[in-house]
Image (cartoon, rainbow, N blue to C red):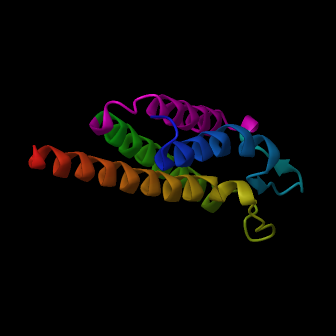
């Protein structure tokens, strides 16, 4: 069923990954210009892949185990994206002069939190189904 709480969590992840990188900047370069995700090809691909995985997981509501695995894969992708941001921010030229990171670097963290919440809800549904099957 699409009206479950994990579907809401996954929809939030999909919207965050697809829309927020356009709105919020990732960091400020030494020239004082704000760098958005569209300037980094790895970030764009990772954000849109994360949004696509979340949308696909929403429609796998009949296959809870596949939905669970897809969410884990999405968490790994977001951890990769977070690692890329940390690597990129530590290797910016002129880091000692300009040390302003944008709120866009926290999008993978929020996505991981909502994916964990979705996986908890999926696990809860799976346990409920198993307990009902035991009573038969």
75 to the left or right of 23: left
**Viewer-nearest residue: 22 or 4:** 4
Q: How many marks?
A: 0
Measured from the top left, where is residue 75 in percent x and y? 43, 48
Measured from the top left, where is residue 52 in percent x and y? 54, 30
Question: Which residue is painted at 59% across and 41% down in the image?
Answer: 11
Question: Which residue is painted at 30% across and 52% down in the image?
Answer: 123
61 to the left or right of 97: left
Identify the image quadrant of residue 106: bottom right
Say which quadrant the C terminus sits in.
Answer: top left
Asked whether residue 53 appears in the rendered view, the answer is yes
From this view, report whether residue 55 is shown above or below residue 28.
above
Measured from the top left, where is residue 35 in percent x and y? 79, 47
Q: Residues in magenta?
A: 38-65
**Viewer-nearest residue: 121 or 47:** 121
Question: Which residue is painted at 36% across and 48% down in the image?
Answer: 122
From this view, report whether residue 111 is shown above or below residue 70.
below
Q: Is residue 46 magenta?
A: yes
Q: What secondary structure characterizes most of the magenta part?
A: helix
From this view, report whether residue 74 is shown above or below residue 57.
below
80 to the left or right of 11: left
**Viewer-nearest residue: 84 or 50:** 50
Q: Is residue 54 magenta?
A: yes
Asked whether residue 93 appears in the rendered view, the answer is no
Identify the image quadrant of residue 38: top right
Measured from the top left, where is residue 71 in percent x and y? 40, 43
Question: Which residue is painted at 63% across and 53% down in the image?
Answer: 107
61 to the left or right of 91: left
Say which quadrant the N terminus sits in.
Answer: top left
From this view, report whether residue 29 is shown above or below residue 67.
below
């Amino acid at each position: 069923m699409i009206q479950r709480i994990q579907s809401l969590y996954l929809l939030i992840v999909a919207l965050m990954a697809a829309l927020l990188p356009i709105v919020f900047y990732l960091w400020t370069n030494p020239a004082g210009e704000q760098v958005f995700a569209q300037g980094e090809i790895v970030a764009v691909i990772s954000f849109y892949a994360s949004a696509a995985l979340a949308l696909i997981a929403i429609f796998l509501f009949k296959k809870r185990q596949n939905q669970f695995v897809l969410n884990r894969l999405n968490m790994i992708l977001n951890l990769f994206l977070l690692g890329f941001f940390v690597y990129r921010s530590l290797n910016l030229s002129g880091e000692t002069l300009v040390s302003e990171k944008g709120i866009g670097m926290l999008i993978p963290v929020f996505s991981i939190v909502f994916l964990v919440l979705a996986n908890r809800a999926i696990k809860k549904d799976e346990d409920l189904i198993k307990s009902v099957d035991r009573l038969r």
